[in-house]
Image (cartoon, rainbow, N blue to C red):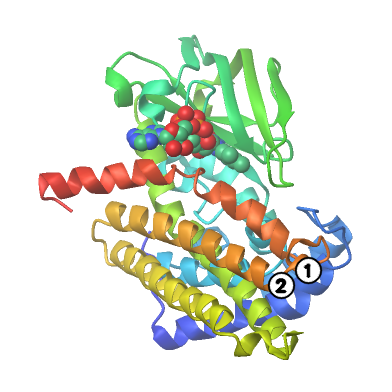
Amino acid sequence: MEAIIPNLEELEHLRQTTRRFMRDEVRPAEDKVQHDAYELPQELLNPLKQKAKEIGLWALRSPAEYGGQGMGLEASAVFAEEASRCKMGAYIPACGATGSNPPAPILLGTKEQIERFAIPAIADGAKVFMAISESSGGSDPARSIRTRAVLKGDHYVLNGSKLWISGAQSAKWGLVFARTGDQGDRGGITCFIIDGKPKGLALREVPVIRSFPTYELTFDNVEVPVENRLGGEGQGFALCERLLVEARVPYAAGCIGIAQEALEIAIDWARDRRAFGSTLSEKQSIQWMIADSDMELRAARLLTQDAARKCDAGLPFKVEASIAKVVATETAGRVVDRCLQILGGMGVAKEMPLERWYRELRIKRIGEGPSEVHRMVLARQLFRGTA
Ligand SMILES: Cc1cc2nc3c(=O)[nH]c(=O)nc-3n(C[C@H](O)[C@H](O)[C@H](O)COP(=O)(O)OP(=O)(O)OC[C@H]3O[C@@H](n4cnc5c(N)ncnc54)[C@H](O)[C@@H]3O)c2cc1C
């Protein structure tokens, strides 16, 4: 599965096409729903999906033979940055929302799993969930996964629970990582595809700081057919790591996109707003906030691009992806905080998107691995001399 690696001109074309699509099509649709909504009704969503397919923005990273665009990680990062420049950001399934990665069965699945799960998900942009974290801890899943899967004849029986699972309610299927053996911390984890809502699976909404909810999934003797095991027993941790490391790059880019949009809103505001006899843009303290934000976003963008390019070139990029994730999420949080300050009362008003982005960006330093864990990964490599 060779990815298409666009040249600089093609990447710029992708950037401009995505930017126009967001500005001219997606944002007007978002304005028709309430401020905190995280999905669009079908009558608004379907025309957007159609348009995204027509202009080549559909399922960017999925292979062309399965209905995607077959592009590499740098293209995905460019797309994620521009696609996040709207109120709902990455939650909008307008461009094939199986996440920024191709659906996992494409990486490790059988022909039948690809046909049953991946191709339909690419075709209609179906949401899928990925359940790794548990109440025993999400930072260190190799040690904290307690959900067990026991083989009984032609099916596995799953018992346990998962916590903080995004999009579980509306997903057509999802991945669950469970322990099948005691082959050390990592080796005993296996991945299963959960199709719909099988008997014994209960969902409980767990609201968080953002409007898009998370769920607790409880498995009470849930039977999963053997053919829904993704990869072999014990291969789950490696798959999980591969999916997470790649996802960190567009995740970082998405945060940069939100902060870039906030910065442009703040610049426009500061140009016009007057206080103490001059515009805000003439005050040095405001100028410095704007200039610092721009410099920090450029640096975060370059680090994200560096991780993406290494991946596309087939080089190791795990550390680079961690660095991009930490720098981009922390920078974006700081930038949106400054922009909110520049807008004063309007910064925290529900009629502007800044307060929503401020809340959502706070999660980004915890999800996909807390900042401290990525720093630990980098520090370990620096001490070993392998970074
Ligand atoms: C809104 C939201 C959506 C999510 N969506 C999903 C999802 O779809 N699927 C999924 O599987 N999970 C999901 N998660 C879970 C997320 O991945 C975990 O919250 C995250 O991995 C941290 O795990 P934890 O919350 O159990 O915190 P813990 O693992 O208990 O860590 C708590 C804190 O301890 C500190 N810490 C941990 N390890 C170290 C270390 N080595 N050194 C120093 N400090 C450390 C960090 O500050 C960390 O924030 C989501 C979480 C949130 C908040």
Residue named by callout 1: 346
Residue 48: image x %, image y %?
Answer: 76, 68
Ligand 1 has an atom within 8 Å of the beta carbon of the residue at disc 2: no
User: In whole angstroms, how far apart are the C-alphas of marks 2 and 1?
Assistant: 5 Å
Residue 2: image x %, image y %?
Answer: 36, 64
Please give the name of the residue rendered at 35% of the width and 31% of the height, measured from the top-left corner: 235
In the image, is residue 158 above or below residue 138? above
Please give the name of the residue rendered at 85% of the width and 68% of the height, measured from the top-left corner: 31
Please give the name of the residue rendered at 30% of the width and 58% of the height, measured from the top-left corner: 320
Quadrant (top left, top right, bottom left, bottom right) of the N terminus: bottom left
- The secondary structure type at the circle numbered 1 is helix
Residue nearest the observer in this picture, 290 or 299: 290
Please give the name of the residue rendered at 69% of the width and 22% of the height, measured from the top-left corner: 198
Residue nearest the observer in this picture, 180 or 271: 271
Can I make out residue 352 in this image? yes
Residue named by callout 2: 343
In the image, is residue 290 above or below residue 181? below
Q: Quadrant of residue 264?
A: bottom right
Can I make out residue 92 in this image? no
- The secondary structure type at the circle numbered 2 is helix
Q: Are marks 2 and 1 in contact (CB under 8 Å)?
A: yes
Residue 272: image x %, image y %?
Answer: 74, 89
Tell which residue pokes out farthest to the left in this image. 385
Give the amino acid type for the residue marked by disc 1 in the picture: Met
Describe residue 169's horizontal placement relative to residue 234 as left or right. right
Ligand 1 has an atom within 8 Å of the beta carbon of the residue at disc 1: no
Give the amino acid type for the residue marked by disc 2 in the picture: Leu
